[in-house]
Amino acid sequence: MASQRSRTFEDLAAEAEAAPVEGWDFSWLDGRATEQRPSWGYQRVMSGRLAEASAALDIQTGGGEVLAEAPRFPAAMAATEFWPPNLAKATQLLHPRGAVVVADPDEPPLPFADAAFDLVTSRHPVTVWWDEIARVLLPGGTYLAQHVGPASMFELVEYFLGPQSEEVRHSRHPDDARRAAGEAGLEVRDLRMETLRSEFFDIGAVIYFLRKVIWMVPGFTVGAYRERLGELHDRLATEGPFVAHATRYLIEARKPAG
């Protein structure tokens, strides 16, 4: 980490700008950033549910990396994704295991019939169309997901964008998810949130993260934020890691059996 901090801003920025950002593999950040994981272990919980399902759908699967870690798929396994580079990656990863990856614009309707799945999953969906989730679930079926919570990584967001309004800081609150799920006719069985510590050790890690998670600082480029990035580079070299806090919540909602 110390060796990264001794490198020039130009060198680190060029390296981060050249790194591929398709999919949800964050291994490029190994040794350059850390992220505390939620205690419930979404991957483990999701894998257990998939092993018991007969037909499942993973919404906004990204490059399919999270879903692919499940050791067992149900007899019918589908996934949706809207970004073309991720679609290609997810197809390559999941097709050999019998999963169908469907191009979907991430707006209603989902391209499936009513009551098609007994399990719908998603990890960090950008948008959640609760009525559509309820529609494609079989009676007695379950939606299991890990969502990004309110004001997640806002230390980093506000470093670049300045203070955000209370309305913006409150968006993605789990209470809103509970209410929306209920309005769609789903019964929330489990809902828990945690605040998790993240650290960035060099400016390349910050640049890579903001290039990959594009909604954090919309329109982010090194050129547009060069001054602030340069100041943060100097700060990292003298003060050590930049600390931010992610929020995550696990939600499980069931469609009534009858």
Image (spheres, rainbow, N blue to C red):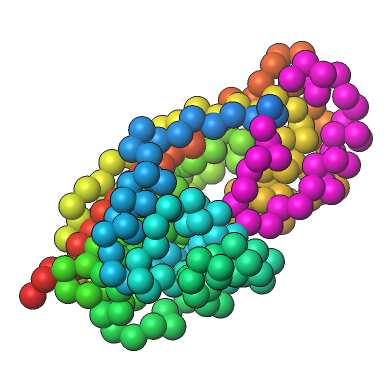
Res 241 visible: yes
Q: Quadrant of residue 215?
A: bottom right
Position of residue 209 relative to residue 72, above or below, is above
The answer to whether residue 180 is visible is no
Question: Start and end of the magenta stretch?
Answer: 1-30
Relative to residue 222, is residue 35 depicted above or below? above
| In the image, farthest residue toward the bottom | 113
Q: Quadrant of residue 77?
A: bottom left
Residue 116 painted magenta: no
Picture coordinates of residue 30, whole percent (x, y): 67, 32
For this view, does 230 lie left or right of residue 217?
right
Q: Quadrant of the C terminus?
A: bottom left
Q: Is residue 8 magenta?
A: yes
Left-right relation of 229 to 7? left
User: What's the residue at 56%, 68% (across, down)?
Assistant: 96
Kindly identify the residue that appears in the image at 80 percent across and 42 percent down.
16
Residue 40, x across and y down, in percent: 33, 38
Farthest left residue in view = 258
Q: Which residue is drawn at the image coordinates 35% and 71% (left, top)?
A: 75
The reply, left or right, for residue 10 in relation to residue 3 is: right
Q: How many numbered marks are there?
A: 0
Instruction: Indicate the position of residue 241 as horizontal and vertical percent values.
Output: 66, 21
97 or 126: nearer the viewer: 97
Against 204, is 64 above or below?
below
Where residue 233 appears, x then y in whole percent? 79, 27
Left or right relative to 216: residue 51: left
Comparing 201 with 52, the one in front is: 52
Residue drawn at the location 87% of the way across and 31% of the way down? 9
Quarter holding the N terminus is: top right
